Amino acid sequence: MVIIGIDPGLHLTGYGVLESNGRAARILEAGVIKTAGLKNFDGKLNEIFLQFGEIIRQFAPDYIAVEELFSHYSHPRTAIIMGHARGIIFLQAAKNQVPIVSYASTRIKKSLTGNGRASKSQVQKMVRSTFKLKEQFYSADTADALAVALCHHNALLGASAASAKGRRKSR
């Protein structure tokens, strides 16, 4: 099974592609979609749309996982801008008929570290440890995208374990 995790942003959109095989997961590819060179808003959104579409076509994912939109009252403009980038991700998922799931940042952190209030550096350290990566991430956006993909992998493991447990009880 292939899971693409996405950390949407207007200038940098992080992505992480995992192959999940039972309990094991491995990184197929991770990186960022860059739009910093583009000046206009619609051009940036179009670039995210086009590049993410290519990633979907290349890896044919079974799921796409994104972090839920978080809005702080002192920065509502940021939430609105992020909503546009996130909408592009949802549009590509729908266009390609790939199920998309959203996770709260606290759920992602808890899934990886056991603490829903873990710091970004703790989450990054756990992602590096899980995949036995020696180097730092090129971008925090890439690490965040891998974290959300890994969270979905863990959620699927939990669902299959609960399903198996239910089947054993019903016998």
Image (tube, grey):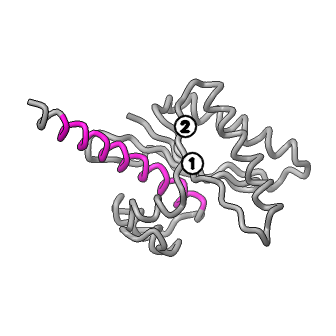
Q: Is residue 63 left or right of residue 13?
A: left
In contact (CB < 8 Å): disc 2 and disc 1: yes
Question: Residue 66: which disc?
Answer: 1
Q: Locate residue 61, reporting x and y percent.
A: 48, 32
Split into 4 quadrants, where in the image is the C terminus?
top left
Secondary element at tag 2: strand
Q: Locate residue 115, reporting x and y percent.
A: 41, 71
Number of marks: 2
Q: Amino acid at mark 1?
A: Val
Q: Nearer the viewer, residue 138 or 90?
A: 90
Secondary element at tag 1: strand
Farthest residue, direction right: 40
Q: From mark 2 to mark 1, how far is it between C-alphas?
A: 8 Å
Q: Locate residue 5, reporting x and y percent.
A: 52, 47
Farthest residue, direction front: 170
At 38% from the left and 34% from the top, the residue drawn is: 1
At 65% from the left and 54% from the top, the residue drawn is: 69
Query: To which quarter of the image does residue 78 belong?
Result: bottom right
Query: To which quarter of the image does residue 58 belong?
Result: top right
Question: Residue 86: which disc?
Answer: none
Q: Locate residue 152, reporting x and y percent.
A: 43, 47
Which residues make up the magenta segment?
141-166
At 71% from the left and 54% from the top, the residue drawn is: 9
Magenta span main SS? helix
User: Mark 2 = which residue?
Assistant: 100
Q: Nearer the viewer, residue 91 or 40?
A: 91
Query: To which quarter of the image does residue 157 belong?
Result: top left
Q: Is residue 33 magenta?
A: no
At 36% from the left and 68% from the top, the residue drawn is: 114
Q: Amino acid at mark 2?
A: Ile
Q: Is residue 5 left or right of residue 92?
A: left
Q: Is residue 18 left or right of residue 52?
A: left
